[in-house]
Image: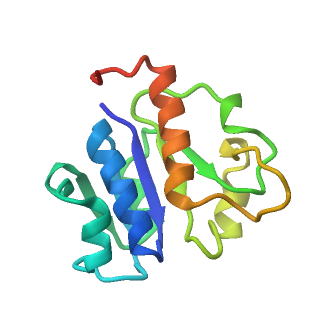
Amino acid sequence: MAFHIVLVEPEIPANTGNISRTCAATGTHLHLVRPLGFQTDDKTLKRAGLDYWHSVKLEYHDSFDEVLEKYKEHRFFFATTKAKKRYTDFTFQDGDFFVFGKETKGLPEELLRQHPETLLRLPMSDSVRSLNLSNSAAIMLYEGLRQTGFAGLD
């Protein structure tokens, strides 16, 4: 088992590349939900992921519903600045999915309404709208890894 990161319609190739590198370093699965805001052969995407792309467990999906259907036995947590609970209010387990929306809009409101109990946020001041996507993904993933004892990592 491993954690999973889902990027729903990511727009910025450098963020996806950085997240892919984090996934490669931690054995985390990366799921990209189309449409993507870039080509997967984009130089920025490849540069940000460096030469780790071969180590990324990567899946492409045509919709988020496809992800939910394929992994219906798993738990999904949805990152949003609109959540009432902090990411530290949850107990994560191996196999959980962390779901992130596009950089400019976040996750669709309908999706947030469908999963109110598993919405989570990173605490921050109100002087910014949100944190960088790749930073947010890393923070939440590493909390899950910490809670599970960094299994399989040195």
**Residue furthest left in the image:** 54
Image quadrant assignment for residue 26: top left
Residue visible at 44% across and 28% down in the picture: 145
Measured as percent of width and height from the top left, residue 2 is found at 33, 34
Relative to 46, 17 lies left or right: right
Residue visible at 48% across and 39% down in the picture: 141
Measured as percent of width and height from the top left, residue 134 is found at 49, 56
Q: Nearer the viewer, residue 78 or 129?
A: 129
Q: Is residue 112 above or below residue 63?
A: above
Measured as percent of width and height from the top left, residue 131 is found at 65, 58
Measured as percent of width and height from the top left, residue 71 is found at 38, 47
Q: Is residue 90 above or below residue 140?
A: above
**Residue furthest top in the image:** 149
Looking at the image, can residue 75 be seen? Answer: no
Counting the numbered discs, the total is 0
Residue visible at 23% across and 60% down in the picture: 50
Quadrant where the image shows the C terminus? top left
Relative to 36, 132 lies left or right: right
Quadrant where the image shows the N terminus? top left
Q: Is residue 144 above or below residue 30?
A: above
Residue visible at 36% across and 73% down in the picture: 62
